[in-house]
Image: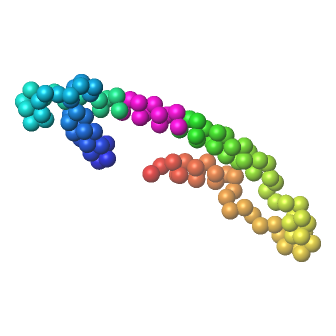
Amino acid sequence: MIGPTFGYLLASFALGKFIKTDSTPLISNDDVRWIGAWWLGKNIIKYSSRLFIKVFLLGWGPMGAICLVLALCMAMFPKTLPRTAQRNLKSGSAERESFLEQKDEPKISIKGTNN
């Protein structure tokens, strides 16, 4: 819904400009001989998409790398910390079972991909 709306707004802006943007036309927008700058919308889209790609790659690329490094560091932590395991052994409480067992993980991940 946003795309067509933006397209119509851009077209109305571009067609309101004279085909030669550097000269002053002798006719007005209401004249049947008026030719709008139909090519202006294409150029606006082309250059704005290039700018978006540059900002996305330069702005979000390093952040993604930082998040990946932090995720790898967090993945290196053990399942239970040594002090916690010692406390559980001293108190005589059995170690709690994990919420997900390893045999259930493939089934759950497949169910998660289905809508």
Tell me the quarter of the picture where residue 30 sits. Answer: top left
Please tell me whether residue 51 belongs to the stretch shown in magenta: yes
Q: Is 4 positioned to the left or the right of 73 in the image?
A: left
On the question of residue 45 being in view, the answer is yes
Magenta segment's dominant SS is: helix
Q: Residue at x 69, y 56 (%)?
A: 101
On the question of residue 39 being in view, the answer is no
Please tell me whether residue 5 belongs to the stretch shown in magenta: no
Q: Is 96 positioned to the left or the right of 7 in the image?
A: right
Query: Residue 106: percent from the left, percent from the top?
Result: 61, 48
Tell me the quarter of the picture where residue 84 sits. Answer: bottom right
Q: Residue at x 53, y 37 (%)?
A: 55
Q: Is 38 positioned to the left or the right of 34 in the image?
A: right
- Against 1, residue 30 (above or below) is above
- Against 64, residue 80 (above or below) is below
Front-lying residue, 46 or 63? 46
Magenta part of the chain: 45-55
